[in-house]
Amino acid sequence: MRTSPTDQAQQKLVDRFGRVATDLRVSLTDRCNLRCTYCMPPEGLDWMPGDEVLTDDEVVRLIGVATGRLGVQEVRFTGGEPLVRRGLVSIVARTREVAPDAELSITTNALGLARMAGSLAEAGLDRVNVSLDSIRPETFAEITRRDRLHDVVAGLEAAAEAGLGPIKINAVLLRGVNDDQAAELLGWSVERGYELRFIEQMPLDAQHGWSRDSMVTADDTLAALSAAFDLTPAQEPRGSAPAELFYVDGGPAKVGIIASVTRPFCGDCDRVRLTADGQVRDCLFARSESDLRTPLRAGASDDDLAARWVTAMAGKRAGHGIDDLGFLQPDRPMSAIGG
Ligand code: SAM
């Protein structure tokens, strides 16, 4: 029998370095309708077999365990592309029921968001993060291998209209492709009231094409932006947020820099991930994961699932280790982990 929130034993997802995970990234599918060159090959990947993917009931049950018993306060749906998951709106609505106080958001490429933003807001979604690497149609198509910039722009507008703000945009800069467009993207975002964040490219691509020498660093990005805007460090405390924030031309508009590679923030990490096939990952770069799907399907109680989740966090490493001599890219690419 399920217990009510008041009589559930409270535990924390604490690791051996004392970090407490309160921010859960839930991947709803490994499939995507774009083919970003830095993420997956043009033909896509071998998608997870359908019977391995958690059902809507299973996803909501695990989120309920995380928010009801394990202190998770934020749930971010991601993928793959979460908008292609049939049942997304219902998953959001049911999550809102089991986690009335949690912050619910989605990371999306925004294709189809124009159609879905209203129902997602009604279902209880708080806000969206939209990925957009260029506002030039030809560069967008070069990066994503799809001519769909207009859909993203329409999706952003619909999200704003539906009250899914503050709207954040995530951008990855690639050398020789869009690294000359950082200031343009920032100007465009500021004009529309979107908060732009640049994320350093990480070694998580299915093709293993990442190279430290060619990646655009946070310093490169700051230099490019500073040539066009006056950037001053934002005063607010950063906490566990991955982005370093800067006021643009005195504010209130801000831009964020997420220097995952060159200035890692693992010491303040408060994230934990659940893959679409029910594996807990304590880090994007984890080399091992903990299976919750098998016990879930074998009839485990919420107590048992919570205990397994707590144990899963014990092995979280101090840092992602990209700079370690023996660094090995995780077996799963970003699209199958959930970015
Ligand atoms: N499809 C959704 C989207 O586009 O936002 C969610 C999943 S996608 C993997 C999440 C984010 O990861 C996107 O902003 C994408 O640009 C970013 N991403 C993918 N591969 C990356 C990499 N190797 N390094 C840094 N960011 C990456």
Image (cartoon, helix red, strand yellow):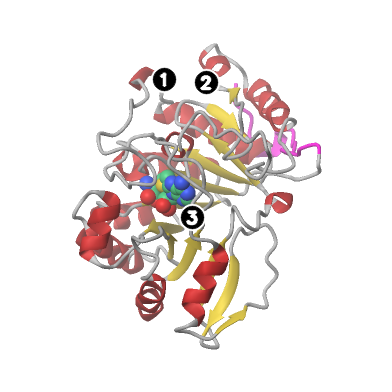
How many numbered badges does the structure rendering display? 3
Q: Which residue is mark 3?
A: 215
Mark 1 and mark 3 lie on one chain; the one further toward the N terminus is 1
Q: How far from the left and from the top, in percent, is residue 98?
A: 53, 40
Query: Label 3 is placed on what type of residue?
Result: Met
Which residue is painted at 61% across and 26% down in the image?
A: 288
* Dot 1 or dot 2, earlier in sequence: 1
- The amino acid marked with disc number 1 is Glu
In magenta stretch: residue 112: no
In the current view of this chain or complex, which residue is farthest to the top?
A: 298
Q: Quadrant of residue 262?
A: bottom right
Residue 206 position within the rendered picture, expressed as x and y whole percent measured from the top left: 41, 35
- Main secondary-structure element of the magenta-colored stretch: loop
State the residue at coordinates (45%, 35%).
333
Label 1 close to label 2 by CB (< 8 Å): yes
Identify the element where label 2 is drawn: helix
Q: Which residue is mark 1?
A: 52
Indicate the amino acid at tag 2. Arg
In space, the residues marked 1 and 3 are separated at their CA atoms by: 34 Å
Judge left or right: residue 301 versus residue 335.
right
- Up the image or down, 134 lies above or below 186; here it is above
Task: Name the residue tied to disc 2.
Answer: 293
Q: Earlier in the sequence, mark 3 or mark 2?
A: 3
* Badge 1 element: helix
Mark in front: 3 vs 2? 3
Q: Is residue 4 magenta?
A: yes
